[in-house]
Structures are given as structure tokens and as C-alpha cells.
Amino acid sequence: MKPVPSTQPTEKVRELLKRALKETEQSSAELAEAVQVPPKYIADLIAGRRKLPRPGRTDLYEGITSFLKLSRNELLTCADAERAQAKPKPVIGPGPKVRKELLALCEPATAKKLARDRTKKGIAFLADLSQRVLDAAQRSTRRKLTDHVSLRGVARQGGSTYVAMRFKVLEFLDLTADTMTTRDVAEFLRPMIDFWDVDIETGVLRVVLRPHQS
């Protein structure tokens, strides 16, 4: 088996995956099975319809690197380069329905103050808070990727497969406050977060997880 050549500076993730699959004589379906995601996920990466999430939000870098026998930081270098080239998007925060759901999880007195502040600064502050609350939930959820027994149990209880449940977790980890939906809040944040609160003057955030989530 030929070693995979080193990545070129301009190589895209999709180009790297195509080349590595060809060099290692593997199929995209085999790669999907190895990293335990639906075949369409890998197909979308190869087609450029989907971007790899940041390393802290997934375990796919290690799995893909190992299966395709890439050098240690080859895939990460390509993904970082793509993110650096992308135009930064303005942070707009979640939509009104999601904001309402998030405020329902907030300490009531603080939630009232945040809801009343309709100034530009207040809206930006709430958008930033929404992302930070989501970040806290994602950090807790990220640990579930390595708890295969628990994930399989949840999948069985919900009448799903392990791969489908794992993919749902990966999708949640790739969310931002801008893309979060009320369904995401219901399925992930509400069962996980007991309440959150923030010191409006200092911006210090406190997120209290439910006992079985901590």
C-alpha cells in the first residue's frame, strides 16, 4: 500500500479525502463505516456540501486520519486553512422562538431584565450569551461520543440505531447559536441544563447542569 503524499498548501478537505481514498484503495462507504457516520455525511464532505467542524466539537479527525493513514495534522491543516479563507459571518444570535426557549431556562429575574433590553447592545449581549450557553451544553455533550454504551442505550430506547444517534450528537456539536432550533433546545439543552444565570454587569456566566449530566 502506497503512503499518502503530504498535503499541498492549497488542498481542500474534499480534495484530500478523494486523494487519500484513492491512494488507500478504500471507498467513501468504508470510511463512513470506520468513523461511524451515515455514508451521506462522508459523501457531503467529499462533494464540498459540508465542512468539518472544529476539532473540539468532534472526534472525526482522529478516526479519518487513522483510517486513511494520513499524517497527524494533515486533515486539521486543510480544515483550518478552509476556515481561515472563509469570510467571517456576523453573529446574529438565535431567532425569537429559540431566544424565548433559552430565557425560559434562565434564572427568572435575570431573564426578565434580558428580555426587556431591546437596545442594539442588549441584543448583541443576548446573542453572545446564547452562544456561551450552547458552548457549555456542547462541552458536556462532547463527552458522550466516547460513552458508546450509553449512546447505544439511548438509541435503543428511542427506536434508533447507534450510528443515527451518534450522528445526531455530532450534528448538535456542530451547531452555533445562529443555527440552533427549538428542537435542539428541547432535545439537548432542556434535558441537560437545570438553569443558567449571568451577572449582567460583569458578563460572568453560570450554567448549572442537571445531576446526571455533570
Image: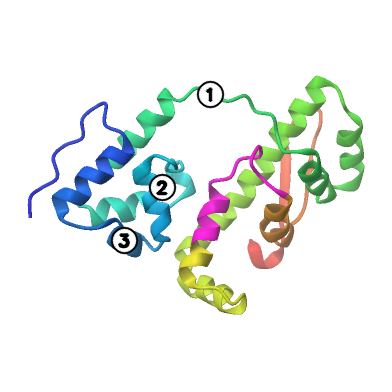
Q: According to the image, label 1 marks what residue?
A: 88
Residue 71 as seen in the image, left or right of residue 131 = left
Callout 1: SS: loop
Q: CA distance from mark 2 to mark 3?
A: 12 Å
Callout 2: SS: helix
Quadrant occupied by the N terminus: bottom left
| Sequence-first tag of 2 and 3 | 3
Q: What amino acid type is highlighted by mark number 3? A: Ala
Q: According to the image, label 3 marks what residue?
A: 29
* Outermost residue toward the left in this view: 1
Q: Position of residue 13 (x, y in %)?
A: 32, 39
Q: What amino acid type is highlighted by mark number 1? A: Pro
Q: Position of residue 82 (x, y in %)?
A: 38, 30
| Sequence-first tag of 1 and 3 | 3
Tag 2 near tag 1, CB within 8 Å: no
The residues colored magenta run 167-181
Badge 3: residue crowd in 10 Å (few <14, some 14–19, many ≥20): some
Q: Is residue 116 visible?
A: yes
Q: Is residue 66 above or below residue 109?
A: below
Tag 2 near tag 3, CB within 8 Å: no
Tag 1 near tag 3, CB within 8 Å: no
Q: Is residue 99 above or below residue 159?
A: above
| Sequence-first tag of 2 and 1 | 2
Indicate whether residue 142 is drawn in magenta. Answer: no
Q: Is residue 72 visible?
A: no
Residue at screen point 50% across, 66% down: 164
Badge 1: residue crowd in 10 Å (few <14, some 14–19, many ≥20): few
Residue at screen point 69% across, 32% down: 128
Residue at screen point 38% across, 45% down: 45
Depth order, front residue of 102/24: 24
